[in-house]
Amino acid sequence: MNEIIFIDKPKGITSFGAVSRVRRVLSEKAGKKVKVGHTGTLDPFATGLLILMAGQATKRCSEFMKLDKEYIAEIRLGETSTTGDPEGIVQKSYTGEPVAEGVIKKVVQEFIGEIEQTVPAFSAVRIKGQRAYDLARKGIKVEMPTRKVHIYNIEILDYDWPILKIRTSVSSGTYIRALGEDIGKKLGTGAYLTSLRRTKIDKYSVDEATPLEEFEKM
């Protein structure tokens, strides 16, 4: 069994959880344990395209991890979250007037091109052999690394204070949570992501993907 599988990941589970569920289905079908790997994680609160590799196809995981990606994100301005998403502790960070759409458009455009991001504390990167999110959950503060990423495009889909909805195409390794937070910092309002959906990985679209629950029933 050497397959490339396109899954539409639901909200509320980790990418590793999705891998485990797909592995169970394929292993039952094959009558033996099938190796399954993913080509790039999605946070538990995020939904969308997850490309999985089964059997010998797992050798191509690193190849797919390097591909560019497209996301639709909903950003809440005027508040911050300890994790940059709805799973953290949210607090109000701005009490001023709603920011004009013209200002939003101008600030958003400043992020297009090569930028330097600080990797979020709640992320899967390893710091001295430990996952950053494990350290963060224990309250251990460490200096997070920075990385250069490329933002190819940011399109404003909707803006109704305090909610800003964008579509963005980015290079591999870009943290959309960090992008949302940085936009909020630039505006002086603070911000965090309330929802995130991965719509494309290179030429592959989420429209080609099977919802995880449907895959399990097939």
Image (cartoon, grey):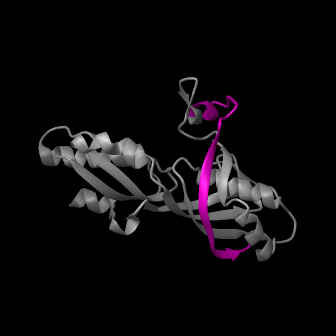
- Residue 34 located within the stretch drawn in magenta: no
Query: Which picture quadrant has residue 50?
Result: bottom left
Q: Nearer the viewer, residue 40 or 214?
A: 40
Answer above or below: position of 39 versus 190.
above
Range of the magenta residues?
134-161
Rendered view: 165 above or below 132: below
Residue drawn at x 32%, y 44% is 60
63 up-or-down from 94: above or below: above
Percent from the top left, x then y, of residue 174? 57, 50
Left/right of residue 58 with respect to residue 158 in the rendered view: left
Q: Describe residue 72's horizontal placement relative to residue 75 as left or right.
A: left
Query: Percent position (x, y) of residue 135?
Result: 61, 30
Left/right placement of residue 7 relative to residue 67 reads left
Residue 86 visible from this viewpoint? no
Asked whether residue 123 is in view, the answer is yes
Q: Residue furthest front?
A: 113
Q: Position of residue 153 (x, y in %)?
A: 60, 65
Q: Quadrant of the C terminus?
A: bottom left
Q: Residue at x 19, y 43 (%)?
A: 27
Report x, y in % for residue 4: 27, 52
